[in-house]
Every structure is written in structure tokens, then in C-alpha cells.
Image (tube, rainbow, N blue to C red):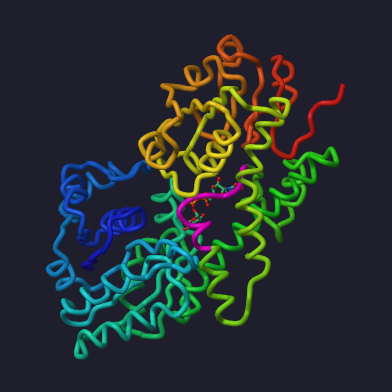
Amino acid sequence: MHVAMIGTGYVGLVSGACFADFGHTVVCVDKDERKIQALRQGIMPIYEPGLEDLVDRNVRQGRLSFSTELSPAVENADAVFIAVGTPSRRGDGHADLSYVYAATREIAAKCKGFTVVVTKSTVPVGTGDQVESISREVAPDAEISVVSNPEFLREGAAIEDFKRPDRIVIGTDDERARAVMTELYRPLFINSSPLLFTSRRTSELIKYAANAFLATKITFINELADLCERVGANVQDVSRGIGLDNRIGSKFLHAGPGYGGSCFPKDTLALTRTAQEAGAPLRIVETVVGVNDARKTAMARKVVNALGGNVKGATVALLGLTFKPNTDDMRDAPSIAIVNSLLDKGAKIRAYDPEGVHEARKVLPEEVFYAENAYDCAKDADVLVIVTEWDAFRALDFGLLKTTLKQPIVVDLRNVYRPQDMEALGFTYESVGRPNLVH
Ligand code: UDX
């Protein structure tokens, strides 16, 4: 099959490279000339484990190419994927669909023969209908079938998720489009990944429902963590105790500083807006959005409390800035709210992140000092805070840290370490939803 992937952001690039790896011929198109030039030289615009090798292999074997020109790619394509951004619209929290509609116009004008136009970007219910009517308006005679095929890729594990998905959701009522989509995903049948065919609107909603449910699960356990702290219970054991019930499941029950990233915050907010306008408000999701926002700043208070209620003039060392490990993505990362709040309270910030510093510099205030590694970060700091659970922070040398820190205080927002171990090492240790040891 011939595929045109419009947009070489996170989703477009990973999906394009994976489809090429399945044996399809893929052209990834982007308006950003610099990005395309870089990709042609094998330079990735994002950090994602395994992506560079995947791209390199498929480019060398002639199945994957990059272009700023949409028309040749679209003219030859059996399927054109729209994988452009759908950021939160300023002011109202709705998804901004201007990039999707602009791409639709260009695609419709260039299509030749029967073409499946697939919305891969996360788009609100009914967007497929709009894409269809815009296409018809631009090219009344074109044979275009619009399909919804949401992505469920986790950053840091995106290639694995694409190649071994729990399910593939395809929203279409059109038999011809169904056949094309089945052919595209055929290599996954050997992994027996189920293909779920639904109506287009249902498919669009599934994506939002999945993200909102996962965000709810995280927020639920985060609030329980607060309760655990008050009543002297252990949230990790609560997670395990409820997660072993198959009806609940153990995943996404890890308490932490609140969810961030490019999907959950934006998608939960957009879903609440859609639901309000449809006259069926999702009050649970509305609450989740509010609780999660408040949580990020509450994490700064945890640090302040660990220092006895005042951080004015104190130096706080933060380990991990990205919203999760194995990515350089800083979008809606809890670290942003934590840094801003601590700076407001008069603290000085030293920070270290294995991959995220370049992106962090764009969104964090200038006053932040970026260290070379975890130990340099801890130098003369009053408290060490683990914000993101990178592997590099899972086996820290606390003997060395003790000599580097001004005082042995650790706030672990990801529950990487065990309270009893930290206490034995002579640290004052605070984590999330786990009681301090009673003497
Ligand atoms: C998510 C969805 O998982 C994916 O299916 C969708 O397509 C895009 O959004 P991603 O944003 O890459 O993927 O990260 P994910 O691993 O889901 O984590 C999201 C956030 O939740 C992170 O901030 C993470 O730290 C947090 N999280 C996750 C928790 O705090 N606790 C958990 O138990 C799981």
C-alpha cells in the first residue's frame, strides 16, 4: 500500500516509520522545511527510543521518505493520514482544528482515484463529518472516504505500542475503506491484535473516553494517596490490593505528582467542553481536570513542608523535568508548576534531566540552573526532589549525595525508594501516600 502521512510530529513520524516497517511505502509530509531536511539527514525532531534506527532502516530500504510537497505523496496514496496537531484552543479549552481542516483542503484538492483519508490526530466527535464535507466542497468529484483511526501511543514506548497494540480502532461504515485499513494493519494480525470496527463518531469518542478514563484512574489514586498520608495507610499497597481485582486492573494506579503530557490534560479538557455543549456534562472528568491541576502546585507545598514550612533562600534540587521518563517532552509537565511555585516562594532551583533540558529551557523561568548530572544538581542543595522517575534516578548513590547535599532531605514524588531504606541511610524522606516511619 502507498501511504501519505501529513504531519511529522510525534504521532505522524512514529506511525509513518512503523507503517514503512510493515512493508508499505510511506511519504511523511511536513511544511517545516528544516524538520524535513533534518529527517532526511537522519536527525530526529523528538527523543523516542528506537525511532532513529527504525527511520534509518526504512529510509535505506526505500520504503520511507520525507517531503515538504504534499501533492505527489497524496496523488499516489491509497491512504492519507492526517496527523497534525490539535492543541487546546486559547480561552475555551476546545481542540483547535484549524490545522486538520487546512490539511483536509490540501489533500482533497490533490487526491486521485479512490483515497481513504484517515484522521489520526485526536479530534472531537463529529470532526470526521466536517472533514468529509470540506473534502466534498473542495473536490466534489473526488472519491474520498473519511475514516477515524485514533492512536493510543505512549511516549517512550510508542514503537512498541504501534507494533503490539491492545486494539486498533477503525471508525467507518464504508466497505472499501474498511478493506484498505485492514490491508494496512494486516501485519499486526500475527500478534492477534484485535481490529475494532465502529462508526466514525464512536471511534472518535473512544479515544477521548480511553484517555479520560486513564486520567481518572490516576487522579483517583492520587487523591487516595492524600488520604493515606492523613490516616497512616500505604497507597502502594492500596493500589496493589485493588489492582489485583481483574475488574479494576493494576495499571495506571501509580500515585505521583499528577498527570501531564501532550494528551491527557488537553484531551480531558476538550472532552468536558464537548460534553457540556452536547448537554451531557461529564462531571467526573470535570473534577479530574480540576483536581489534577491543583495537585501539581500542591507538590510544591510538599517540598516546602519538608523544609519546615519556608523555602525562602533555600536551594531545591529537582531530578527529572519531563512529564515522564524516556521523552524530552515538557508539555504540561508537573515540574513546570512545581518550579514556578517554588520560585514564587523564594527558593533557588537547580535541575537535572537526562533528555529534557533543551525543551525545559523553553518553558521554565530563566532563573533555573541546569546541572550536568544528579550529583552536580544536589550540590549544596537543601532538599533533593525526584520529580520524574528516569531509570538514572533509580539507583542513586546516597552516600555521595549525603556529602553533596547541604542537608539529607529527599522528597520522592514518584515513590522510587522505600521509606525504611532511606531512613536507614540517614535521610529525612517524604514520598507520596506512604506513612513516615513511626519511632
Ligand atoms: C497517553 C496514553 O497512555 C496514550 O494511550 C495516548 O495515546 C496519549 O496519552 P502518554 O501521554 O505518552 O500517553 O503517557 P502515559 O504513560 O499514559 O502517562 C501520562 C501521564 O500520567 C504521565 O504524566 C505519567 O507520569 C502519569 N501517570 C501514568 C501517573 O501519574 N500514574 C500512572 O499510574 C500512570
Q: Residue at x 43, y 77 (%)?
A: 171
Q: Which residue extends farthest bottom?
A: 141
Q: In this view, does 350 lie above or below 47?
A: above
Task: Locate the N terminus by quadrant.
Answer: bottom left
Say which quarter of the image contains residue 387.
Answer: top right
Q: Is residue 89 magenta?
A: no
Task: Locate the C terminus by quadrant.
Answer: top right
The number of numbered discs placed on residues in the rendered structure image is 0
Q: Is residue 261 magenta?
A: yes
Q: Residue 7 versus residue 371: which sits nearer the camera?
A: 371
In the image, the segment drawn in magenta is 257-267
Q: Which residue is drawn at 81% across and 26% down?
A: 437
Q: Residue 79 versus residue 306: which sits nearer the camera?
A: 306
Residue 236: percent from the left, percent from the top?
A: 72, 41
Residue 438: percent from the left, percent from the top?
A: 86, 25
In the figure, is residue 50 to the left or right of 253? left
Q: Main secondary structure of the magenta part?
A: loop
Q: In this view, does 325 lie above or below 3?
A: above
In the figure, is residue 216 to the left or right of 350? right
Residue 100: percent from the left, percent from the top?
A: 32, 70
Say which quarter of the image contains residue 405.
Answer: top right
Q: Is residue 323 above or below residue 180?
A: above
Q: Residue at x 72, y 47 (%)?
A: 239
In the figure, is residue 187 to the left or right of 389? left
Q: Is residue 388 above or below residue 375?
A: below
Say which quarter of the image contains residue 290.
Answer: bottom right
Residue 336: percent from the left, percent from the top?
A: 51, 42
Q: Which residue is drawn at 26% across and 63% down?
A: 5
